[in-house]
Amino acid sequence: MNILLLGSGGREHALAWKINQSDKINKLYIAPGNAGTSEVGENININILDFEAIKTCVIEKNIDMLIVGPEQPLVDGIGDYFLEDSILQKIPVIGPVKAGAILEGSKDFAKDFMMKYNIPTAKYKSFTNSNLEEGKKFLESLSAPYVLKADGLAAGKGVLILDDLDEAKKALKEMLAGQFGDASATVVIEEFLDGIELSVFVITDGKSYKILPEAKDYKRIGEEDAGLNTGGMGAVSPVPFANKEFMQKVEEQIIKPTINGLISEKIKYKGFIFFGLIKVNEEPIVIEYNVRMGDPETEVVIPRIKSDIVDLFVHTAQETLEEATLEICNEYCTTVMLVSGGYPGSHEKGKKIEKIEEIKNSILFHAGTKQSGENVLTNGGRVIAVSSYGENMNDALEKSYKSAEQIEFTGKNYRKDIGFDLK
Ligand code: AMP
Ligand code: GLY
């Protein structure tokens, strides 16, 4: 098979690495990819939101399947674009159509969906400019901290958590006035949940599903979860508190009602669902849905999948996922993200990365890198995810940290305490 994978981050390198191990693969293309993906496939320089350019590429390269890494093309309707095109409609897309992608594209929709199908989530109300005053009153009825969420996609920045009521009212007004553009024309205000988060992933063909390994990611730049939010500074899998009993609750109370809800809504969903969960008093509660894999969770989830991932994709496309086997490796996997100095604030790019060829005990998934002649250069805030296996979490972390130390580039920064809250 010839496969085209969209995206350019660590998630896509991990997916490409795994796809490339399949016997079914003839040629793997990644658009636009990075220096890492070019080692396991061929990068193609196209804009992932330019559907016509994608169509041209699919035809020229004889692509048999499209895998969509990030959410934006899905929310923009790449799945529908393929289904509505007479040439493309026979080419399966792994990633939901727009009607499914809205689970991530609109928090208001996602909350309504959860209410309708009795899926545990924080209490909430949604507001627009026309009922701003009601929104302020609703804030008064809650106790701090206050959680305000832009309805639409806001590059991971659309959630504000504020301790002060007046600040929360001000933030609501600013969001509704367009702080995040159209994405915050509607704002969801919800109850604050106090607990520990984890990410649970399934792949579904719209009828049945397979639960992939769960993971926990570390979003803040600073140790012990201090400082600004980032795209993710590291991850571990499995998550020790997600034991059999807890995962059974996740499956019964969250996964099954979600899949059944999609079926009831007649949404043909083929792809990944990422449940952003929080454990409060032993109960799993949904914080958000994403319609793609997580990053950097993918860099620990994918290495733990033993089965052929292309086989899983083919079963997903053919709606025979029930027949597929999913074998998971028992070992732990951890990843530590090397980032550019200054990230998540302003940071420089183009720094030469050295010693990557010397790393033997970790798998390096490139997040923001670029090939320049013989050299690999930094090309973003998150640079390389250093993933390692271990018999237990500490073993895996020890390897990730040893490799993280060895790799060199000017301004290199990383968190030294990934997994700290699970030990
Ligand atoms: P999101 O963009 O929806 O992933 O939200 C970003 C982060 O905000 C989440 O990962 C949580 O840490 C936090 N968050 C979102 N909703 C809540 C909530 N209701 N209570 C507590 N924390 C939340
Ligand atoms: N790691 C969280 C996300 O991918 O949204």
Image (spheres, rainbow, N blue to C red):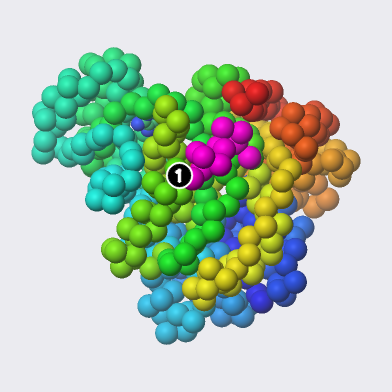
Residue at 22% x, 22% y is 142
- Residue 92, compared with residue 229, is above or below; it is below
Residue 358 in magenta stretch = no
Residue at 51% x, 20% y is 227
Taking the image as shown, residue 67 lies to the left or right of residue 50, namely: right
Viewer-proximal residue, 416 or 9?
Answer: 416
- Residue 232, compared with residue 79, is above or below; it is above
Residue at 74% x, 43% y is 331
The quadrant holding residue 276 is top left
Q: Position of residue 72 (x, y in %)?
A: 44, 54
Viewer-proximal residue, 214 or 31?
Answer: 214
Question: The magenta stretch spans which residues?
Answer: 238-248
Taking the image as shown, residue 36 lies to the left or right of residue 159, namely: right
Residue 242 in magenta stretch = yes
Please give the residue where the numbered disc 1 appears in the rendered image.
250
Residue at 64% x, 40% y is 237
Viewer-proximal residue, 40 or 307?
Answer: 307
Q: Residues within 10 Å of mark 1 (few under 14, many from 20)?
A: many
Q: Position of residue 409 (x, y in %)?
A: 76, 32
Residue type at mark 1: give it. Val
Image quadrant containing the N terminus: bottom right
Q: Position of residue 290 (x, y in %)?
A: 44, 49
- Residue 175 in view, yes or no: no
Q: Position of residue 86 (x, y in %)?
A: 42, 84
Mark 1, secondary structure of its residue: helix
